[in-house]
Image (cartoon, rainbow, N blue to C red):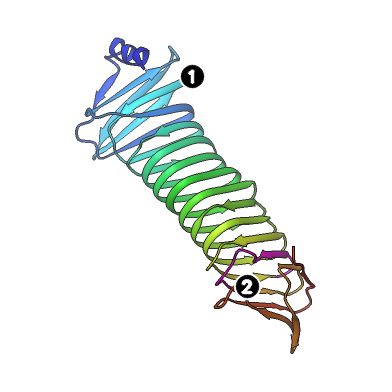
Amino acid sequence: MILFALLFQILSAQEFNIQQAKSIEVLATNLNLEVVSGTETKLKWLCADKKCKIKPSLKDGKLVVHVESNEKVKLKVPQLPLHIYVKHLTLSLQNWQQDLKLRGMNVTANIANTKGVIDINESLARLKIQKHSGEIKIDAFDGKVQIANSKAALTISQFTGLIGLAKVDGNIQVTTQNADTLIKDSQGKLRFKSAKGQLNVASFKGDIYGESKDGRAELSPLAKSTIHWKADRGEVMVDMQNMSGAKIDVGSLQGKMQLIPSLKIATEGTWRVARAKPLNSEQGAVLVRTNKASIRMSSE
């Protein structure tokens, strides 16, 4: 930190007055960027590359920063809405209290201790987001998304790859074609839609609404949760051992279903139906409906 401060003093000429700026926009093709929050009304920068080129301009309240560098760039800016348009980006951002927008093709980002709206649209996204409060919107084709210890509304649309959520509190909406998704130790309202992806929900408290075609869903919610699930050909496993007071409505056309503990099966028209109360429950209810699917019960 001392060295960093000294370098900023040495490169004090590398600054730009942005007193009238209401937002910041960073433009580049390839960029390794660290953003540091500053209280001054000036843009300051530090480049590891001697050939680095920083071209700031201010127009209609927007600070536009064009960056050309083969090495890491550190920007020190006031807390303002930050928009980054970079084709290939590596980003480090902490303690940011304003909205963040990322656009490009390939992003690797480590984001922590932030507030506001995070809006990311990338072809390939490798994201690690921790301790965020507000809203997170992610639209990606492929990648690895990890979100933890956050109180936020999440909207994730990802074609393939991996999605991991841990200790998230809020409304969660995940839409995927073939991504594998793990959600644990979280609460709120989950809406999940998948064509072939795998889903594992462990220790979730709240409402779960899901639709799946193929793929496998393993659901292990906590007490007083609600599950509404529809599957075409995919497998569904529901562990109800810790679901006192739960409400469950699971339907499948041709997929396999595994229920723990066991339920009795009856036939109602073309549907095979299992009705019961969850274990140790006086108010909960379970309804499982299937047309051609097999239902497996166990008391593990």
Task: Identify which residue is drawn at 55% across, 54% down.
Answer: 157
- How crowded is the residue under tag 1: few (<14 C-alpha within 10 Å), some, or many (20+)? some
Mark 2 / mark 1, whichever is N-terminal: 1
Q: Position of residue 155 (x, y in %)?
A: 49, 55
Q: How many marks?
A: 2
Task: Identify which residue is drawn at 54% across, 52% down.
Answer: 185
Identified by mark 2, the residue type is Pro
Most foreground residue, 163 or 88: 163
The mark found on residue 210 in the picture is none
Vertical order, 158 against 252 (above or below): above
Q: Residue furthest bottom?
A: 269
Q: Is residue 45 left or right of residue 189?
A: left
Most foreground residue, 162 or 278: 278
Residue range (magenta): 232-247
Q: Is residue 227 left or right of residue 130?
A: right
From the image, state whether disc 2 or disc 1 is nearer to you.
Answer: 2
**Displayed quadrant of residue 92:** top left
Where disc 1 sits, the SS reads loop
Identified by mark 1, the residue type is Glu
**Displayed quadrant of residue 254:** bottom right
Vertical order, 214 against 66 (above or below): below
Residue carrying label 2? 278
Q: Is 171 covered by the magenta stretch? A: no
Q: Position of residue 136 (x, y in %)?
A: 44, 50
Q: Residue furthest top?
A: 10
Q: Position of residue 115 (x, y in %)?
A: 36, 44
Residue carrying label 1? 71
Q: Residue furthest left?
A: 19
Where disc 2 sits, the SS reads loop
Most foreground residue, 247 or 27: 247
Q: Residue furthest front?
A: 280
